[in-house]
Each structure stands twice: as structure tokens, then as C-alpha cells.
Image (cartoon, rainbow, N blue to C red):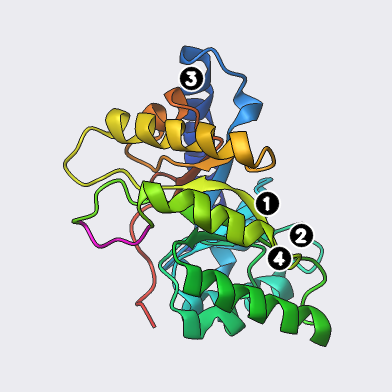
């Protein structure tokens, strides 16, 4: 697609998504600025990320380390001055920790003690080597439906994982993330996540972020306290790339 046509298409979609978030915030009695828009750019080219950056977005997410690694580097070449931050939102294998800490500012899919330790070690090594300049921000992914196998720790595992993260200087606990169960009522899921977040903040006041809500259910997530919605399809449309 012609770059100018794609820019116009993305600008229109971005305006519509922002309007949805604004309406959801007003309906919930919240300020629109309380909810961050995270563009999920998986399967889309770095050129789209560059256009979104031109339109004012600064937060981008990927769910596959292999695809993200090359895209982040390409984007940096296209927009070297852009103030972009990158999030890893997909399930992460421990053997990918060393690679992911070289490009990710935030990992939202932390769900086990072994992954915490792998990320801690990888981040420490990257800081020592000069591959990073700041600690890795992390969110605990909570499973709201254990049968789905989409990643996430059990709700009762959150306190111990949070304590483990805060014992290291290389990781920064920022909050929780979840995906609403398929076929279930997202309002019930997001209400559960809100209660988990509230309990977590009681012990870790810095863990204020709640990453919840996607293209199809962001309104419900905002109504239940989400501070970050992860939007792909509604912003970028159907998939464009063949998965690597």
C-alpha cells in the first residue's frame, strides 16, 4: 500500500480507537489520560510502527521474540529519534530471556519463578555489558481461566512472585496483566483482575498498572480499572506479515 494511504488509514483507525477509550473512560467516571494505548504490532511491518510513531504513539507491543528483535532494530533505523518503548506481551520461554532484554523495556507476561530468575539474570548481564541502561519493567500475567493454556500464573501465586521480583534491583514490578477468557464474560474476568491488583498494591504500592482489554473488550476493561489497553486489530487491521 502507498505510504500516504496507509498513513491516512492508520490515522483514521487511531482516531476511532482513541474515541472508544475516551467514551469508555467517561462512562466509568475516569479521565481519558488514565488509560494508555499500547499498539500491538505483531505481524505488521516496522514501516507501520514508524507511521504510528509519526501519529504520536510511543508504546508498542510484540508477542514473538524472533519477530520483535528484527522489527525493533528496523524501526530504530527508520525513526532513530522516536521516543518508543517496547513491550513483550506473549508467552516467553526462559531461553529467550537473554534476547528479549536487549530490546524490551517491559515484559508483561511474567508468570513463574523460573522466568523471573531468567529475566533477572539476563537483565543483570545486559546492564553489565552495556546492552541496557535501565532495569527491566515487568508485569505479572494472571491466568483467569486455567484451562486455556494461554499463560499466566494462578491468582494465589501472585504474592510470592511479586515478592521475588522486588528483591532484585534488576527488575521493577509495575503491576498485572491478563487476557479475558475465551467465551466468558469479560466483565467478570476484569473484575477479578481488579481485585487481584488491589491486593497487590496493598503490599507493593508501586505496582499500579493493570494491562487489560483488547480490540473487542477494551470498554469492559476500562470500566474495571485497566490502565493500559492492548490494541492490534482495531488499530492496524488484519494481519499483514507471514509469521517468521
Which residue matches tag 1?
58
Task: Report the disc number at residue 23.
Answer: 3
User: Residue at the location (65% across, 28% down)?
Assistant: 33
Callout 1 crowding tier (Cα within 10 Å): few <14, some 14–19, many ≥20:
some
Tell me whether the residue at label 4 lies in contact with that at label 2, contact meaning CB atoms closer than 8 angstroms: no
Please state the total of marks drawn on the protein image. 4
Disc 3 or 1, which lies upstream in sequence?
A: 3
- Element carrying mark 1: loop
Task: Report the disc number at residue 82.
Answer: 2
Side (left or right) of 188 relative to 62? left
Which residue matches tag 4?
168
Quadrant where the C terminus lies?
A: bottom left
Disc 1 to disc 4, how far (Cα)? Answer: 27 Å
Residue 149 forms part of the magenta stretch: yes
* Region rendered in magenta: 148-152
- Element carrying mark 3: helix
Amino acid at each position: 500500500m502507498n505510504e500516504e494511504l496507509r498513513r491516512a488509514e492508520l490515522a483514521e483507525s487511531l482516531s476511532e480507537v482513541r474515541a472508544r477509550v475516551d467514551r469508555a473512560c467517561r462512562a466509568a467516571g475516569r479521565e481519558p489520560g488514565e488509560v494508555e494505548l499500547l499498539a500491538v504490532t505483531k505481524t505488521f511491518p516496522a514501516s507501520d510502527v514508524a507511521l504510528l510513531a509519526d501519529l504520536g504513539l510511543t508504546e508498542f507491543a510484540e508477542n514473538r521474540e524472533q519477530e520483535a528483535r528484527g522489527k525493533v532494530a528496523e524501526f530504530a533505523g527508520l525513526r532513530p529519534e522516536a521516543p518508543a518503548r517496547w513491550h513483550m506481551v506473549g508467552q516467553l520461554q526462559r531461553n529467550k530471556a537473554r534476547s528479549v532484554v536487549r530490546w524490551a523495556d517491559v515484559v508483561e507476561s511474567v508468570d513463574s519463578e523460573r522466568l523471573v530468575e531468567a529475566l533477572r539474570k539476563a537483565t543483570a548481564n545486559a546492564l553489565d555489558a552495556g546492552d541496557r541502561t535501565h532495569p527491566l519493567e515487568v508485569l505479572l500475567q494472571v491466568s483467569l481461566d486455567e484451562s486455556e493454556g494461554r499463560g499466566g500464573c494462578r491468582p494465589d501465586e501472585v504474592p510470592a512472585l511479586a515478592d521475588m521480583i522486588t528483591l532484585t534491583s534488576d527488575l521493577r514490578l509495575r503491576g498485572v496483566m491478563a487476557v479475558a477468557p475465551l467465551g466468558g464474560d469479560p466483565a467478570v474476568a476484569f473484575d477479578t483482575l481488579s481485585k487481584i491488583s488491589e491486593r497487590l498494591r496493598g503490599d507493593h504500592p508501586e505496582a499500579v498498572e493493570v494491562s487489560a482489554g483488547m480490540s473487542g473488550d477494551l470498554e469492559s476493561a476500562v470500566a474495571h480499572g485497566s490502565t493500559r489497553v492492548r490494541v492490534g486489530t482495531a488499530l492496524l487491521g488484519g494481519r499483514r506479515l507471514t509469521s517468521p
